[in-house]
Image (cartoon, rainbow, N blue to C red):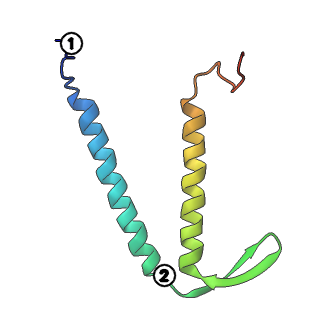
Amino acid sequence: MNERPERRDSDGDRGGKVRLVVGWILAILLVAFVLANTTSVSVNFLAKKVEMPLIIVLVVTALVGAAIGGLLMRHLRRPRGDHGDRDD
């Protein structure tokens, strides 16, 4: 019988659940905030003025921020000596 012992890592499991709950709470707050701000606004970006609903500006800003955060986390988790070079 080649069974592995069940791993009981209460701190790691609890930490994951806490992050999940906090993530859901932040997502719900973000949705509530976005839905409460649907008026049209002027946005100046790269010398161009655009009129659009504030909800679009907020969603795009949140998505860009999440993408940048994800890229930074991926970069920070990479081992120090690994620069993406492969020795084939």
- The x and y percentages for residue 76 are 57, 33
- The x and y percentages for residue 68 are 60, 50
Q: Mark 1 packing: few (<14 Cα in 10 Å), some, or many (20+)?
A: few
Q: CA distance from mark 2 to mark 1?
A: 58 Å
When asked about the image quadrant of residue 7, the answer is top left
Which residue corresponds to mark 1? 2
Q: Earlier in the sequence, mark 2 or mark 1?
A: 1
- The x and y percentages for residue 65 are 57, 56
Q: Residue furthest bottom?
A: 39
Which residue corresponds to mark 2? 37
The image's mark for residue 76 is none
Labels 2, 1: front one: 1
The residue at the point 59 percent across, 65 percent down is 61
Q: Residue furthest front?
A: 1
Picture layout, residue 6 above or below residue 39: above
Amino acid, disc 2: Asn
- The x and y percentages for residue 79 are 58, 22
The residue at the point 54 percent across, 69 percent down is 59
The residue at the point 58 percent across, 28 percent down is 78
Q: Mark 2 packing: few (<14 Cα in 10 Å), some, or many (20+)?
A: some
Amino acid, disc 1: Asn
